[in-house]
Image (tube, grey):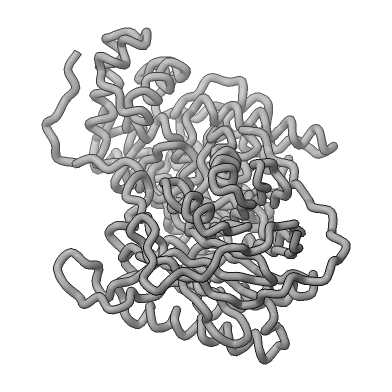
Amino acid sequence: MPQLRLALAQVNPVVGDVAGNLEIVLQQAREAHAAGAHVLVTPEMALTGYPIEDLAYRRSFIERSQAAVASLSEQLVQEGLQDLVVIVGHLDRARDIPDRLGVPKNAPVNAASIIHDGAVVARYDKHHLPNYGVFDEFRHFVSGERLQIVQVHGVDIAIAICEDIWQEGPSRAAKAAEAGLLVVLNGSPYEAAKDDERLELCARRAVEGECALAYANLVGGQDELVFDGDSLVVDTRGELVARAAQFQTELLVVDLDLPAATAAMPEPGTRFEGLLVERTIISQEPLPAYEPAAPSVAERWDDLGERWQAIVLGLRDYVEKNGFRSVLFGMSGGIDSTLVAALACDALGPDRVFGVSNPSEWSTEHSRSDAADQAQRTGLDLRTIPIAPIFDAYQDALHLEGIAEENLQARIRAVIWMGLSNAENHLVLACGNKSELATGYSTIYGDAVGGYAPIKDVPKTIVWELAKWRNAWAESRGETPPIPPNTISKEPSAELRPGQRDSDSLPPYPVLDGILDAYVERDLSSAEVVAEGFDAEIVEKVVTLVDRAEYKRRQYPPGPKISKRNFGRDRRVPITSRWREQL
């Protein structure tokens, strides 16, 4: 059987930085060539970054992407890399489609160009455009209408882009074309507890197509999305051959024994399931036999480890890609800000992490000491600015009581954080968790202030689990646990009035998170939630809190999506709405 050395470029591009992304691809081509690879595959939209949202409509952006493809072709020749077949993802424009109502402006396509010997020899446009969850591709792109098969060293290679293999078609097309390999360019974001759906999908498609399958995925953070890499290759039996690391850039190189091309060239105009079939021959002669390199299979993180690494990567890239030097946040000594502090130190290093303790008249001594303990454990910078004198000055003028008095404290703290942010160029982090965000248990323009919210998609019960996991991970490596044990064990409180506890306003967090999982994540009705065993009165209270808090969530900072359904791109409900669930 013919041999082929394949390289999958698991890269972290920046949306809009076409020149920078081009250099990333070129560097991967250099490394692939040095490793003896014959074919290099990048992820989806590698030259433009992904997702590009409404940037897709800009003719200038499309033309910049097209120019980058041409430049890539030229530079590969200039550097003596022209024999390497490069399959690169980028933005392009549909052929012969005029602007009209119902077609995205300038007819953009999510494309993959096949480059060899200084020329683009073929182009594949993504067929299936997802329009669910975090995806709006039906809004942004025109669907492709061609199946592309390229022959390299006597092996037929079929091409697909991400959603294409989640739908029926590409594997059947690969089988019909008798392709030996199906390569898939992907921009597949991370989602917790997916139970390795990608491997199962790739294995199933490989068996259906009777071909090996190579899956190249993006890595890195982009606004609310985190791409986890985890690129992989399976053989015709669906058995895992090689796998890249999660949450890291990597060039995964693997040798494959593949069936020789046997199918004849299709007649012009040949269609398969309504799609035009095109085959391009790059090289027909198989390679001389060579000694294959041993494939690598990276170890995967456990469930909590995945979540931790996803948040760390999302936070790091948000800071780095947006040009911030450091982060700042309120350190109350509570579990949420303590977890955010540990995440920030892992993402950026403690020298770029600044905590601010703002004790009030009702702040407990252990809150102050726990914050100081964590600063000692991690090495982050902690300063203390009491708010009691400022609060008294406001009260002399306003004479607030009840909730208004409590919220005033949170807003004073936010003014301090934002003032320091402006003066010292820190990105302020909001420390609220998903349970609080769901129920509106936060002060708008107070503790909800900030530019990024690392744990906004983490339920409170998982906050504690992540804290325990991080400490255990540190201990397993002989390091000092970054989170004070007292922070994990003590009862949570906003400390805005004497003796306050979260349980004064909310059900116990295990109950609350169970209800939120049913109502928010799975879209169950109130009656269906009660049918799962939850108390009807508590369900009604929680559902009412969730429905009334949408205006707060709309104004909350972005944060990394790690659950099946986050507050942000995934879940979009009206702010102004009289719909209420009925039991």
**Image x and y of residue 45, in percent:** 48, 66
Inspect this view and state whether residue 219 appears. Answer: no
**Image x and y of residue 327, in percent:** 55, 55
- Residue 386, above or below 529: below
Left/right of residue 174 with respect to residue 2 in the rendered view: left
- Residue 446, above or below 519: below
Q: Which residue is outermost to the left? A: 578
Please count the marks in the image.
0
Left/right of residue 359 with respect to residue 571 in the rendered view: right
* Residue shown at the point (42%, 42%) measured from the top left: 389
Inspect this view and state whether residue 7 appears. Answer: yes
Left/right of residue 47 with respect to residue 376 in the rendered view: left
* Residue shown at the point (45%, 20%) measured from the top left: 509
Along the viewing direction, whichever of 255 and 474 lies nearer the viewer:
255
**Image x and y of residue 107, in percent:** 28, 72
Q: Quadrant of residue 269?
A: bottom left
Q: Quadrant of residue 326?
A: bottom right
Quadrant for the C terminus, please: top left
Q: Quadrant of residue 361?
A: top left
**Image x and y of residue 317, in percent:** 56, 59
* Residue shown at the point (32%, 25%) measured from the top left: 519
* Residue shown at the point (70%, 83%) measured from the top left: 81
